[in-house]
Amino acid sequence: MSQLWKVARMIEDFPRFKYHPDPLTTGVFVALKGQCPVCNQQTAYRYVGPFYSETEVEGICPWCIHSGAAAECYDLMFVDEDEVEPVSQPERVSELTKRTPGFFFPQGDRWPAHCGDYCVLLGSVSWNNDLSSLPGVKEDLSRIRARLEVTDDLLRADLCRPNSPLRAILFRCEKCLTYQLVADYE
Ligand SMILES: [Zn+2]
Ligand SMILES: [Zn+2]
């Protein structure tokens, strides 16, 4: 009974991450009970995303990422600061790298910034999401095509293919609401 209550409360209290708003859907947290190594509390969720640290640490709870306690305790980053686009406010860099759950990028691609702030990670996408109609995506597709040196047909085919080695990750700028697409072969 008390267990059930605890889990219910935790779903309601799940922290809101500005740059990664739905980390349960993107898969970097799993619903699995355990003890968080930072706060030592029982938690219903464990972090299974990337982190950059000297120490191996497992089972961090979302609250300890959100508060910065995990980053401080283990001197770690969840998003590598060398793999983010530059923005002028250091506070925004530290919120993204130390207080935001990370995401596995195909090839060390960079977390995009737009209008002076980091874009919000929406998750992995395929062509079926009507990508090209989203504002900003057409430009990104032609940039990606040029960088990967592939034809438009091949790029589209690889974006549609199930289990494709080409992974595309969609972001949105919350200021101007244009989309940013990052895509690379794994
Ligand atoms: Zn914790
Ligand atoms: Zn923008």
Image (cartoon, helix red, strand yellow):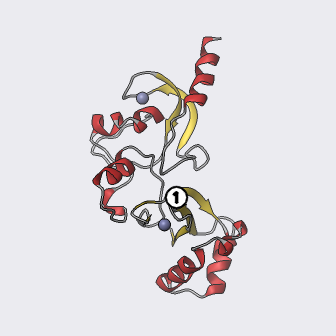
Q: Find numbered disc 1 in the image and state the secondary structure of the residue it sits on.
A: loop
Counting from the top left corner in percent of width and height, residue 16 is at 51, 40
User: Residue 169's x, y, as percent?
Assistant: 55, 63
Q: Quadrant of the N terminus?
A: top right
Q: Judge the density around disc 1: few (<14), some (14-19), many (≥20) Cα neighbours within 10 Å.
A: some
| Left or right: where 183 falls relative to 58 | right
State the image quarter where residue 111 is shown.
bottom left
The amino acid beneath tag 1 is Glu
| Residue 174 on image: x %, y % | 52, 58
Instruction: Choose top left, top right, bottom left or bottom right for residue 160.
Output: bottom right
Residue position marked by numbered label 1 in the rendering: 174
Q: Quadrant of residue 73?
A: top left
Q: Residue at x 63, y 23 (%)?
A: 8
Q: Is mark 1 within 8 Å of ligand 2?
A: yes
Is residue 44 shown above or below 86?
above
How far across and down, in percent of the image, does residue 64 sit? Answer: 40, 33
Residue 64 versus residue 138: which sits nearer the camera? 138
